[in-house]
Amino acid sequence: MDEALYELVRGGYALGFSRNVKVGACSLSVVVDYQSIAVANIGDCKAVLCRKGRAIPLNSQHTANSPAEQKRLRELHPNEKDVVVCKSTVDQPRAPQWPYLWEYPLCMMGLLKETVGSRCYVKGRLQPTRSFGDFHLKHAEFKADLETGKDFLRDAHTFPYITAEPQVDLYPRHHQDEFIVMGSDGVWDFLTDEEGVSIVRESLKSDPSPETAAKA
């Protein structure tokens, strides 16, 4: 799919339409059969399974806020300090590390934290680290804004910075599985996994319609 989009965008870019290279979309797909749940994700969407009232996230969100994605990008672009640009930081709990035994009681008291980046962007431009489109972060041929004559990215040398490669996960079905909530960052930036599951579960108690639950 990304290759087909690339051909369309390249044709428009050759005609002087450069803004299209900054357009992109994330994608989340879930396939459920009698035995398993398959999840394929590109970007900042998330699927959360409700199993007997418990919220279980089914995929990672690919954003520049993710420590794992930050690590991956910095390993791929070791000579570009601005491959991830964070506009603020937050303190969050972390797990104790062996052999630092003194960290274990601190963790139990909730005092063991680490400072991580918040509001982070790939090359200071985009939060998702995987998406369809957004070719100004994938191909050097699209780095220039043809309308202004300036580059979209500053000091960009090692394309691509983002990818359309999905993360695919497979889970076995369980007899206590109830439903799956799928949403973009517009949902999960404001709700915890538990809150999202609770809202849908309460809605389904009074109305079994998935459409009504989605509007809840």
Image: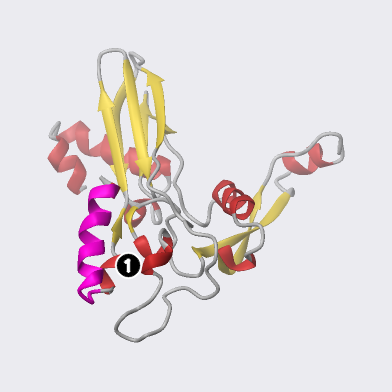
Front position in the image: 193 or 168: 168
Q: Nearer the viewer, residue 106 or 128?
A: 128
Q: Is residue 180 left or right of residue 111?
A: left
Residue at 58 percent across and 53 percent down: it is 70
Q: Residue at x 21, y 64 (%)?
A: 11
Q: Is residue 8 shown in magenta?
A: yes
> Could you say which quadrant of the image residue 129 lies in?
bottom left
Indicate left or right for 105 with 38 as reference: right
Residue at 12% over, 34% down: 209
Which residue lies at the image location 41% right of the left edge and 28% below the top edge?
169
- How many marks overall? 1
Q: Is residue 87 rendered magenta in the image?
A: no
Q: Position of residue 214 (x, y in %)?
A: 20, 44
Over which residues does the magenta segment extend?
3-17
**Helix, strand or loop for disc 1:** helix
Q: How far across and how far down the image is residue 84, in percent?
A: 56, 63
Depicted 34 relative to depicted 20: above or below: above
Instruction: Find residue 65 and report its horizontal and vertical position in percent.
Output: 53, 56
Kind of residue at disc 1: Lys
Q: Quadrant of the N terminus?
A: top left
Vertical placement of 166 versus 9: above or below?
above
* Circle 1 residue: 22
Quarter residue 58 falls in: top left
Q: Residue 15 at x, y = what percent?
A: 20, 74
